[in-house]
Image (cartoon, rainbow, N blue to C red):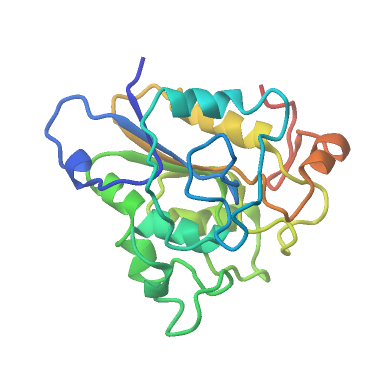
């Protein structure tokens, strides 16, 4: 079985520069606005409302996430550079405060303006670092880090923008939030499709190590997850209608 290092954020220089014959694969998972649930260690959920409680969403809890947490290393004093979805994603990709984004140009740090532009996209980020050191890089799920000209929009056009930022392979892509112009109303959240595409990439027959940035679109409040499950087909995607259900 391939060795996989699952990370939420760390210094990566030692990893990509390693001369070891067997470098680990690296998977970063960044769910969209996932809350800090009560069973997980503090810091408190909301400093302005310390008595607020956020229990697991069902009686079964979150068994897959709990398996990863209990079987790995939990960082109990980790802090975010930004508490919003897009700006925190920018920090994950670059390792820097979103106020440093070239796209902001001295403005407030807000999602619509915090994009990967210039060297933030073409040079100074994690996927570029991995690719320059022999890793195959891939991205799946929500992006929201490129400035999109919707007069030119196609799914392939959106993929090309993401690839410019250091990714060899992009699939299962949601270019922005579901309410943006790329969504014609025919699809919603589709975690089956995103996950299927990511697993297919993991199964590639290759000796080269890989870096994967996997971004679930849930549980972001842009669209009801329950509505996505009950009113939309898992064959409906931003790339069009699939010929069969994701396996």
* 104 or 166, nearer to the observer: 104
The answer to whether residue 41 of the structure is visible from this angle is: yes
Residue at the (66%, 34%) spot, across then down: 56
**x, y percent for residue 10:** 30, 46
The residue furthest bottom is 106
User: In the orientation shown, which residue stands out farthest toward the front?
Assistant: 51
For the residue pair 206 and 84, the one nearer the viewer reads as: 84
Q: Residue extending furthest top?
A: 1
How far from the left and from the top, in percent, is residue 176? Answer: 63, 59
Estimate the x, y position of residue 53 in percent, counting from the top left.
66, 45
Q: Residue at x 36, y 14 (%)?
A: 1
Q: Is residue 75 above or below residue 1?
A: below
Residue lying farthest to the right in this orientation: 231
Residue 218 location (% of width, % of height): 66, 44
How many badges with numbers are in the image? 0
At 15% from the left and 36% from the top, the residue drawn is: 18
Residue 145: tell me if it is visible.
Answer: no
């Amino acid at each position: 079985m391939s060795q996989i290092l699952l990370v939420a954020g760390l210094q990566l220089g030692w990893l990509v520069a390693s001369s070891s014959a067997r470098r680990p694969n690296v998977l970063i998972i960044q769910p969209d606005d996932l809350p800090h649930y009560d069973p997980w260690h503090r810091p408190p959920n909301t400093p302005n409302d310390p008595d607020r409680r956020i229990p697991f969403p069902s009686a079964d809890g979150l068994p897959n996430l709990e398996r990863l947490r209990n079987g790995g290393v939990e960082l109990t004093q980790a802090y975010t550079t930004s508490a919003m979805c897009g700006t925190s994603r920018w920090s994950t990709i670059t390792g820097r405060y979103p106020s440093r984004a070239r796209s902001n140009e001295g403005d407030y740090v807000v999602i619509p303006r915090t994009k990967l532009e210039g060297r933030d996209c073409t040079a100074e980020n994690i996927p570029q670092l991995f690719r320059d050191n022999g890793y195959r890089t891939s991205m799946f799920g929500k992006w929201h880090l490129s400035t999109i000209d919707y007069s030119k929009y196609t799914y392939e056009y959106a993929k090309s923008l993401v690839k410019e930022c250091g990714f060899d392979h992009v699939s299962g892509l949601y270019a922005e939030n579901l309410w943006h112009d790329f969504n014609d109303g025919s699809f919603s959240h589709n975690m089956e499709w995103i996950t299927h595409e990511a697993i297919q990439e993991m199964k590639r027959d290759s000796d080269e190590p890989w870096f994967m940035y996997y971004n679930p679109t849930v549980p972001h409040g842009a669209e009801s997850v329950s509505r996505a499950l009950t009113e939309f087909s898992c064959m409906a995607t931003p790339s069009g209608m699939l010929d069969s259900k994701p396996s």
